[in-house]
Image (cartoon, helix red, strand yellow):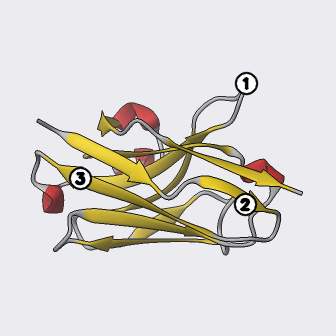
Amino acid sequence: EVQLVESGGGLVQTGGSLRLSCAASGFTFDDYTIAWFRQAPGKEREGVSCIMSTDGSTKYADSVKGRATISSDNAKNTVYLQMNSLRSGDTAVYYCAAGHPSVTGLLNDNEYVYWGQGTPVTVSS
């Protein structure tokens, strides 16, 4: 059974940091690009970052560039998203996903096949 389990979300003050984790099982982790998406209340789901299976290269949305770092521990089948300098606009449910996206669709949710249940992040002032 394919599973992606997110953890690490919670309540954090503006300017604070969080590290989200995505533990994968049930598929060949090394063969898949893993991405983080988020969805704020009343908004569409947004691609945040991904780490590619081919060479470990990464991509970030402009909204988090410079504040987020994605990394992977292949021995643990786990991907992390370190978020710093958090703002109220980062408040959302964060999801990890696995797939084989095209080069132009790295942060396009339509190109991912496996999804976790999400972990909520609330940034308060």
Quadrant containing the N terminus is top left
Disc 3 residue type?
Ala
102 on left or right of 29:
right
Q: Secondary structure at mark 1?
A: loop
Q: Is residue 109 above or below residue 125?
A: above
Residue 85 screen position, x and y as percent: 75, 71
Q: Residue at x 35, y 64 (%)?
A: 79
Q: Earlier in the sequence, mark 2 or mark 3?
A: 2
Q: Secondary structure at mark 3?
A: strand
Q: Residue at x 56, y 54 (%)?
A: 9
Please say if the residues under marks 2 and 3 sit with CB atoms less than 8 Å apart.
no
**How many numbered marks, from 0 up?**
3
> Which residue is the site of mark 3?
24
Q: Earlier in the sequence, mark 3 or mark 1?
A: 3
For residue 102, the mark is none
For residue 12, the mark is 2
> Which residue is the site of mark 1?
42
Q: Confirm whether residue 98 shows in the render.
A: no
Residue 14 screen position, x and y as percent: 82, 64
Q: Is residue 20 above or below residue 72?
A: above
Q: Residue at x 76, y 54 (%)?
A: 123
Q: CA distance from mark 1 to mark 2?
A: 21 Å
Disc 2 residue type?
Val
Q: CA distance from mark 2 to mark 3?
A: 25 Å
Disc 1 residue type?
Gly
Q: Give the camera-side residue of 39 and 21.
A: 21
| Residue 87, quarter of picture | bottom right
Residue 72 screen position, x and y as percent: 32, 71
Q: Give the camera-side residue of 42 and 100.
A: 42
| Residue 97, quarter of picture | top left
Dot 1, crowdedness within 10 Å: few (<14), some or many (≥20)?
few
Q: Secondary structure at mark 2?
A: strand
